[in-house]
Image (cartoon, grey):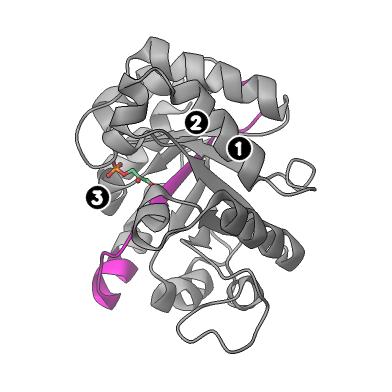
Amino acid sequence: MTPGLRPLIAGNWKMNTLVREAVDLAKAVVAGSGSVKAELLVCPPFPYVAGLAGMLAGSTVAVGAQDCHARDKGAHTGDVAATMLRDCGATHVILGHSERRADHGETDAMVKAKASAALAAGLVPIVCVGETLAQREAGQALEVVHGQIAGSLPEGFVAAGGVVAYEPVWAIGTGKTPTEEDIAAVHAAMRAQVGAATRLLYGGSMKPGNAAAILALPNVDGGLIGGAALVAADFLAIAKAAG
Ligand code: 13P
């Protein structure tokens, strides 16, 4: 944790849930959120953003999206603008997730343009960075993360409360996590790069069993949770581990 920064526990639901499951999961998160001190965010698939934002209005659980386009409108079939998400009640948007970098060829420059659009729309961008296994084994983790941050954060990001999530690609959905020393080393380097005001999340196989130890590390200001965010009790247990 970083003194003075409220932890953020964010659920990235990825391409999971049908409507009924999304509604039930969101309801269960709200129902169990009473004693949670961390800020809570759920990021469902696009079709459910408006419905869940309406449903959770007035609760302590915010709703975000998992991507946005860099433009406000136009001939971009299948894409969704940050302004639309904001208009639907979203407050945050995850950008540059490694799955989007891999599946859709998103570059740092594209992520930066999307983050710029998010800021202009009044959304808090959560920009994801992280090295592959080959890069870690080659001793390049710090360099890769530094480069992604340098290339992906637009002007105004820090002032607007933008969030950075460190998600080592090889830790996502694998049950593997870096050592506490390795997480702390990356987060210390990110802190030196982005300054004291920016929340730095860890993501990658975070579960109720390892959350307390990870969240207690210096400069880890919350978590971006994948698989465990699909089980309300697990997501809430992680949130409670944040204090
Ligand atoms: P898992 O928690 O399933 O490893 O996913 C992490 C992630 O990619 C969150 O964005």
Q: Eyeballing the image, is 199 above or below 21? A: above
- Cα distance between the residues tagged 1 and 3: 31 Å
Task: Please tell me whether mark 1 or mark 3 is closer to you in this view.
Answer: 1
Q: Earlier in the sequence, mark 1 or mark 2?
A: 2
Sequence-earlier tag: 3 or 2: 2
Residue 202 spot, x, y in % from top left: 44, 32
Residue 27, percent from left and from top: 36, 62
First in sequence: mark 1 vs mark 3: 1
Where's residue 187, x and y in %?
Answer: 53, 22
Q: Residue at x 74, y 40 (%)?
A: 158
| Marker disc for residue 149 | 1
Helix, strand or loop for disc 2 = helix
| Type of amino acid under label 3 | Val
- Mark 2 — residue? 144
Q: Depth-wise, is mark 3 or mark 2 nearer the camera?
A: 2
Q: Quadrant of ligand 1?
A: top left
**Highlighted magenta segment, given as a residue range:** 1-24
Secondary structure found at label 1? helix
How many residues crowd mark 3 within 10 Å: few (<14), some (14–19), many (20+)?
few
Cα gap from disc 1 to disc 2, whole angstroms: 9 Å
User: Which is closer to the viewer, label 1 or label 2?
Assistant: 2
Asked if the stretch drawn in magenta spans residue 145, the answer is: no
- At 47% from the left and 72% from the top, the residue drawn is 49
Pick whichever, 37 or 223, lies toward us: 223
Task: Give the alpha-carbon distance from disc 3 to disc 2, as whole Å.
Answer: 32 Å
